[in-house]
Image (cartoon, rainbow, N blue to C red):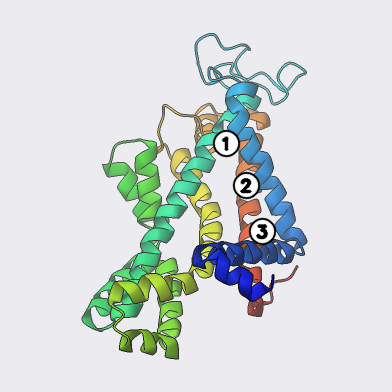
Amino acid sequence: MTTETKGVTAGPRALAWQRRRRSAVRFWQQYRTHRAGLAGLAGLAFFALLALTAPLTVGSDVSSVTGAPGRPMESPSGEFPLGTDQFGRNLLGLVVWGSRVSLLVGLLAAALSVAIGALVGITAGHFKGAYATVLMRITDWFLVMPTLVLAIALATVMSRSLGTVVLAIGVTSWPTTARLVRAQTLAVESRPYIERAKALGGGHWHIMSRHVLPNVMPLVLAQTTLMISSSILAEATLAFLGLGDPTVVSWGGLLQDAREAGAVSSGNWWYLVPPGIAIAVVALAFTLCGRAVESVLNPRLGVAR
């Protein structure tokens, strides 16, 4: 049976899945040539495994203050490889458990930020006129305002919870994505097939969802990967400033607890170093993955391998 005959009998949906599988295979073949991207992916896989298996490896009661297994501020030992905190809790278990919150907040905040930015960018690039002008002026206002200051202001006036942290980061970090997506949307809408689609009666929703969105998705995907690292750093900053959820354990919250306990002045380095290194490694891993994805989806960038 020829390829054409297979295509006819398979149907359009099967053909679409075949194209997607081939695209995924090509993407992975190009991605694995980036050694830095593979290193970042390995780091993310390690921390994701830690987060998923935390209830089994360290237990859900690791954050409990009552019945802590060690003495307060105990240095690293065979029993406690990373020492204990001010309440006598195992710091290794706290760092492992904190990965769940930090990764979750980073993913959700980045998804919210990129979703807002993509919506603003696509609609502003499609409709143009007064609507686009107003949206872009709002975007410019958010761009010139310090993101962290806006996030702190939102986290201060709202209740202290993970939802507040996600919302504060997401609604203040979308302008860069909006600008990038709008520029890509303008480039896509200048192509001849968009004019043909409009001439054939394609409406606004059809043009944006069936023609513009698929063409800007590579940019959105790369921007999402890069935004996750920024969101994790922002969550750690808010938690360090005491604006996170006090009922959960996160890496930024551990740093804030260490500051309150006087770990810096007393020289208890084991209280500060592990969560700080975890934040830096995860942020670097997401950045490496994001750069590799960006290079694969847009080879003209010439990102170094």
Real-space Cα distance between discs 2 and 3? Answer: 10 Å
Which image quarter: residue 182? bottom left
Quadrant of image for the N terminus: bottom right
Residue at image position (31%, 80%) is 202
Question: Dot 1: few (<14), some (14–19), or many (≥20) neighbours within 10 Å?
Answer: many
At label 2, the amino acid type is Val
Which x, y percent locates residue 169?
40, 51
Q: Is residue 170 above or below residue 142?
A: above
Which image quarter: residue 189? bottom left
At label 3, the amino acid type is Leu
Real-space Cα distance between discs 1 and 2? Answer: 9 Å
Real-space Cα distance between discs 3 and 1? Answer: 19 Å
Residue position marked by numbered label 1 in the rendering: 99
Which x, y percent locates residue 183?
43, 79
Mark sitting earlier along the chain (3/1): 1
Mark sitting earlier along the chain (1/2): 1
Q: Is residue 283 above or below residue 125?
A: above
- Looking at the image, can residue 222 be seen? no
Residue at image position (55%, 29%) is 262
Q: Tag 3's secondary structure?
A: helix
Q: Nearer the viewer, residue 17 or 151?
A: 17
At label 1, the amino acid type is Ser
Q: Which mark is residue 288?
A: 3
The number of numbered discs placed on residues in the rendered structure image is 3
Q: Nearer the viewer, residue 34 or 101?
A: 34
Question: Dot 3: few (<14), some (14–19), or many (≥20) neighbours within 10 Å?
Answer: many
**Hey, which residue is sitting farthest left in the picture?**
130
Mark sitting earlier along the chain (2/3): 2
Q: Tag 1's secondary structure?
A: helix
Q: Which mark is residue 282?
A: 2
Which x, y percent locates residue 163?
36, 40
Q: Is residue 136 above or below residue 103?
A: below
